Image: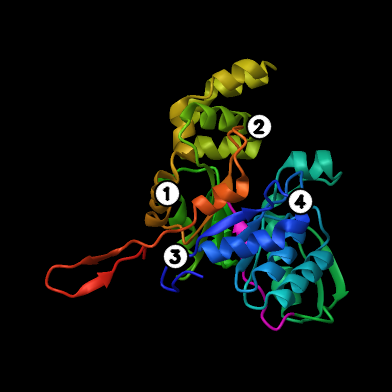
């Protein structure tokens, strides 16, 4: 494990390897220097199972969901699942919640995507009480719970982080949660986004999932990420987020082509300058330097998500190549030799 004075540094699981191999993969990641393992839940594996496996292989790692949605699990089930992970990894599990999007909630899970801000807020309030072992009998704005109590509340309730895009959810993350989870933004954007979270008080974590493609083939990296841009940034919530961040002029040709149903033109309309803002790519050393820019602007837990350039590279080896590297000792004028790390 890395020196405790270093920043936390995370990797996203699962990777494209059999799930049964993930305990060993998690162990290799932590031995290489990763402090955190965070899951993702979209259309592949669920957000909790990979973390349970990682907990068995890497018993010292921080674990987190980024994110699970309160629309796709009932409040009591969400509390029970979080309590299970908190018991398995006491003091090391972090529950990341997010509203997700209409395609995930409505199109894929058959649930109404109504009042996402309020649903997330109400779920945080419920979970605070439930995970503390309280009996909950409450009518919230978006749901009602009648007499639920966890029979095995965790000794250490997990911190709760909220996936947040614009001002309202960012402020909620700082006010009622323990921090925010960010994605689809540049390092420079963090300076605009983080202050809204810190309005809620000191000590708030800023977790940021960043897309990383460790390859020297810039064209291949951009081509792979361009497909992700067209898939995600046409979702209304993400489109509004990019407008708020000031990218409307860069993205409008892509949005127009997508609205016409011309997927090929939409792909071609995504400019390289936007990709280079939102995608970390280059050699492993270049990628690490880019990730540190996010940290410099206020990210406390950078979390890598690998982007496949289509070159057949082993994702586990890629992850290991991106592991944090301590800076060597250097001589400070007027002082003794000091180990200078990424503090």
Q: How is the image coloured?
A: rainbow
In this figure, which residue is indicated by the disc labeled 2?
A: 231
Where residue 7 is drawn, which disc sits there? 3
- Residue at mark 2 to residue at mark 1: CA–CA distance: 25 Å
**Residue 323 vertical position relative to residue 127 in the rendered view, above or below:** above
Front position among marks 4 and 1: 4
Give the x, y percent position of residue 241. Answer: 55, 40
Q: Which residue is mark 4?
A: 18
Report whether residue 267 is seen: yes
Mark 3 or 2: in front is 3
Q: Nearer the viewer, residue 177 or 342?
A: 342
Query: Residue at (46%, 51%) from the top-left corner?
Result: 193
Q: Nearer the viewer, mark 1 or mark 3?
A: 3
Task: Look at 43% across and 41% down and name the residue there.
Answer: 283
- Front: mark 4 or 2: 4
Could one spot residue 96 in this view of the protein? no
Earlier along the polypeptide chain: callout 3 or callout 2? Answer: 3
Q: Quadrant of residue 332?
A: bottom left
Name the N-terminal-most of marks 4 and 2: 4
Q: Position of residue 259 (x, y in %)?
A: 66, 20
Q: Residue at x 40, y 44 (%)?
A: 286
Real-space Cα separation, disc 4 to disc 2, in angstroms: 26 Å
Please provide the residue range marked out in magenta. Answer: 154-165
Find residue 192 and name its label: 1
The numbered mark, 1 or 3, whose residue comes first in the sequence reads 3
Residue displayed at 82% across by 45% down: 112
């Amino acid at each position: 494990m890395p020196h405790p004075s270093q920043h936390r540094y995370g990797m996203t699981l699962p990777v494209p390897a059999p799930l049964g191999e993930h305990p060993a993969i998690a162990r290799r990641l932590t031995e290489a220097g990763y402090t955190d393992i965070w899951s993702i839940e979209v259309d592949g594996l669920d957000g909790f199972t990979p973390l349970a496996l990682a907990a068995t292989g890497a018993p010292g790692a921080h674990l987190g969901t980024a994110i699970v949605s309160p629309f796709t699990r009932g409040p009591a089930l969400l509390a029970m699942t979080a309590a299970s992970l908190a018991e398995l990894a006491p003091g090391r599990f972090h529950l990341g919640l997010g509203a997700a999007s209409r395609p995930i909630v409505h199109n894929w899970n058959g649930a109404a995507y109504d009042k996402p801000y309020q649903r997330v807020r109400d779920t945080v309030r419920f979970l605070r009480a439930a995970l503390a072992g309280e009996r909950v009998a409450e009518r919230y704005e978006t749901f009602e719970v009648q007499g639920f109590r966890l029979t095995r509340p965790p000794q250490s309730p997990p911190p709760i982080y909220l996936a947040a895009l614009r001002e309202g959810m960012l402020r909620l993350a700082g006010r009622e949660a323990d921090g925010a989870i960010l994605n689809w933004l540049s390092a420079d954007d963090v300076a605009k986004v983080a202050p809204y979270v810190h309005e809620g008080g000191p000590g708030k974590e800023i977790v940021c999932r960043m897309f990383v493609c460790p390859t020297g083939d810039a064209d291949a990296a951009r081509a792979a990420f361009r497909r992700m841009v067209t898939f995600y940034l046409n979702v209304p919530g993400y489109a509004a987020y990019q407008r708020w961040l000031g990218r409307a002029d860069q993205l409008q040709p892509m949005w127009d082509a997508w609205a016409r149903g011309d997927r090929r033109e939409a792909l071609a309309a995504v400019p390289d300058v936007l990709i280079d803002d939102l995608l970390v790519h280059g050699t492993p050393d270049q990628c690490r330097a880019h990730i540190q820019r996010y940290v410099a602007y206020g990210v406390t837990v950078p979390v890598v998500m690998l982007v496949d350039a289509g070159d057949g590279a082993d994702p586990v080896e890629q992850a290991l190549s991106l592991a944090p590297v301590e800076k060597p000792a250097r001589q400070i004028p007027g002082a003794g030799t000091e180990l200078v790390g990424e503090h």
